[in-house]
Image: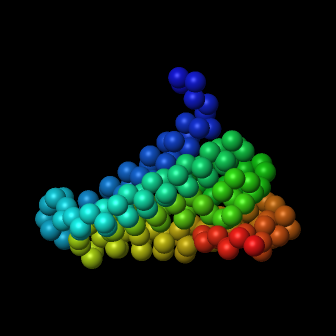
Amino acid sequence: MFGVNRSDAAAAGYTAYVLAFWSIGLPVVVLVGERGSAVPVWRPWPFAVLAGIALASGAALVMAGGRRLAHAGVGLFGTQPGPVLVASGPYRYLRNPMDAGTVLVAAAPALALGLRQTWLVPVAAIVYLAVGFEPLEERRLLEAFGDEYSDYRRSVPRWFPRDAE
């Protein structure tokens, strides 16, 4: 595939899915539901810049985390652990860099658009990931890796990196 390996292609595909679903699909549904059309109401330009930073940072986290997992043989859709516990790259600083990135991607439209209802999108992402997805994923990782994952979970925060010491 033009010199791109499968792992990188999988990570790029997953990143495209996150961008399409959380920064385009759901915000359009909210806009149409609230205004009857998908024509956005933009906030002043500094908010658009902030939204661009959130979108780019979030996509970079999703892509970097996805590449790391895919290279280790982990499927990107689902909660099944791979053959090894990935604790390098962005996983040195966050247990869930792809989820943190997804929330940033989901927050971008809310930052850029002038409708309060668009904040439902990042809230939905947080609830879905923190309440629905991550508990199952964490349980499966604990079952697969035992003490190794317990130690990792104790030393690496979930979504927000600790201050450098």
- Report the number of numbered marks: 0
Question: Which residue sits at x=18%, y=65%?
Answer: 41
Residue 94 visible in the snapshot: yes
Closest to the observer, 49 or 29: 49
Q: Is residue 28 above or below residue 123?
A: above
The residue lying at 53 percent from left, 23 percent from top is: 2
Which quarter shows the C terminus? bottom right
* Residue 44 location (% of width, % of height): 23, 67
| Picture residue at 67% right of the left edge, 74% below the top | 163
When the figure is inspected, residue 62 is found, relative to residue 161, above or below; the finding is: above
The furthest residue to the right: 147
Residue 136 appears in the rendering: no
Residue at the far left: name it.
Answer: 36
Q: Is residue 17 left or right of residue 66?
A: left
Horizontal and vertical percent position of residue 15: 49, 48
Q: In the picture, residue 11 is in which quadrant?
A: top right
Image coordinates for residue 58, horizontal then vertical, percent: 49, 58
From the viewer's side, name the closer residue of 63 and 81: 63
Question: Residue 53, image x and y in percent?
Answer: 42, 59
Q: Quadrant of residue 144?
A: bottom right
In the picture, measured across the screen, residue 99 lies left or right of residue 81, that is left
Question: In the visual, does 22 lie left or right of 27?
Answer: right
Please name the residue shown 77% across and 48% down the image.
Answer: 83
Q: Is residue 116 left or right of residue 146?
A: left
Q: Quadrant of the N terminus?
A: top right
Q: Nearer the viewer, residue 143 or 153?
A: 153
In this rendering, the answer to whether 107 lies above or below 19 is below
* Scheme of colours in the image: rainbow
